[in-house]
Amino acid sequence: MKVKKKTATRRKAASRAHQDGNYDPTDRRAFLKGVARRNQGQPEFLQAVEEVAYDVFDYIGEQPKFSAKLVFERMTEPDRVLIFSVAWEDDEGNTRINRGYRVQFNNALGPYKGGLRFHPSVNLSIIKFLAFEQTLKNALTTLPLGSAKGGSDFNPHGKSDGEVLRFCKSFMLGLHRYIGPNLDVPAGDIGVGSREVGYLFGQYKRLTGEHAGGTITGKGIEYGGSLIRAEATGFGTVYFAVRMLEHHNLDIRGKTCLVSGAGNVALHCALKLAQLGARPVTLSDSSGFIHDPDGLDEEKIAAIKELKEVRRGRISEYARSRRRVSFHAGARPWGVKADLAFPCATQNELEGKDARTLLANGCIGVVEGANMPCTAEAQTLLRKKVLFGPAKAANAGGVAVSGLEMTQNSMHYHWNEQELDAKLQDIMTSIHGQCLEYGRRGRKTDYVRGANIAGFVRVGRAMIAYGV
Ligand code: NDP
């Protein structure tokens, strides 16, 4: 009891010291205590901040210009948090209510920018962790993009088309005053694909009377979307993996790869792997994973895409239709022997025990397509032993092409597929270069450290330029 009281008193003191200015800005432990005190009940947000703090505090010890202005402390405090009610009517005429969120985290580099997630697990902690990660990720793209994230605890699974439309209309009614091409530009994420983006943008247009294309990205090609936006996150993740392997004199061709998820990121990650001669052997959804020992080729991936995106079916249905493919209910794919792993479903889907299994099976690289898919324990283990591509670097291709969609909208022009793919590859190469520049540890590269510090430096310099 006494120990608990003492810890609580110390935490309060750390938090007060931060607000009063009586605080050592190079003391990581004091900083983390303050963050924990001010963000109670937000484990995902604290996990994300702690991981970055580890590297940033190491760096700012020798960089007083950042520590004196409390740049990192300010970077972990969102500019604005919006929470709004979303009432809508189901097909039976019942009134339903969900909670909407938009966290506008940091606009030092450009308009707030980040996706919307519709999933029952959505809460303030998850949206804040995603928005905070977005700050560093968007900085790594070198495009003029600030950071945000939003969404709702609404579950689109099992809802009719009409119900999804009514929900999206009500969600946008709550959000439209706070977004715009130079203010805040949402996009898709889990549960928000091309259908939802269409409904959201349609409602924005109705409410404002403007076809302000740059207000939302991931739009359909017919009404201002960009080519390869749908593919960009998954393709970019593989391009980043290729750069990492090349830098270590390794080749992606012939590598057996585990991919989790069967959504936008996972399917395009698997597709690019297959196109480059690697052998993706798994995909998953929340009901389990499929294993195809022969490898998923372009034709098989197209069939799964049709099943998931058009028929909105479960991944198990695919296994039933193919003799050599097995389905593993309630399990994740990390126990299958492979060279590389690409977690592309959701946060904390790869735990410490999974990391140990991957290592025991001879895995040489883990590249994160999803946001924070590895738990802190898994990341610590993997970061030391294999090539580890962190999400904020590896999956930045999606937001990068969203940034290019904004550019095309403001130019009233569009680039073709080859031009955009070349730009995406350039951006992924540049992110890899930034990781090398800031992540060198002796003869090795720590990509997590590189991404954290490179992103921090870019945002931090802009924040210092503005004055406090
Ligand atoms: P989708 O909604 O298209 O797909 C998500 C996939 O992950 C589905 O197969 C889903 O299965 C599975 N999944 C979701 N939650 C869980 C869970 N709790 N346990 C197991 N499986 C789960 O989303 P995206 O592909 O767009 O996003 C995937 C990840 O990539 C997220 O972390 C997202 O933040 C990140 N990301 C996405 C970007 C984009 O451009 N879309 C950009 C950068 C990052 P089921 O259908 O059964 O729910």
Image (spheres, helix red, strand yellow):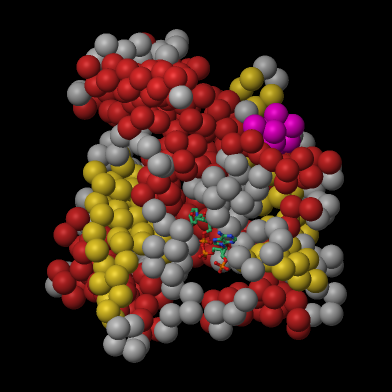
Number of callouts:
0
Q: Is residue 30 above or below residue 84?
A: above
Identified at 38% across, 72% down, the residue is 196
Identified at 50% across, 17% down, the residue is 58
Observer-nearest of 199 and 36: 36
Residue 328, how many percent across, how many down? 75, 67
What's the magenta bit mostly, secondary-structure-wise?
A: helix
Q: Image check: 43 left or right of 272? A: left
Q: Which of the 4 quarters of the picture holds residue 332?
A: bottom right
Q: Image check: 142 left or right of 85? A: right
Residue 11, how many percent across, how many down? 37, 22
Most extreme residue toward the front is 1
Q: Is residue 294 above or below residue 313?
A: above
Residue 211 is a magenta residue? no
Most extreme residue toward the bottom is 92
Residue 414, how many percent across, how many down? 37, 64
Residue 381 is a magenta residue? yes
Q: Which of the 4 quarters of the picture holds residue 106?
A: top left
Q: Is residue 27 above or below residue 317?
A: above
Residue 13 visible to the viewer: yes
Residue 443, how many percent across, how many down? 70, 20
Identified at 41% across, 18% down, the residue is 6
Q: Image check: 51 left or right of 271? A: left
- Work out which quarter of the rendered image holds the C terminus and state it: top left
Q: Image check: 173 left or right of 74? A: left
Write the start and end of the magenta stretch as one range: 380-388
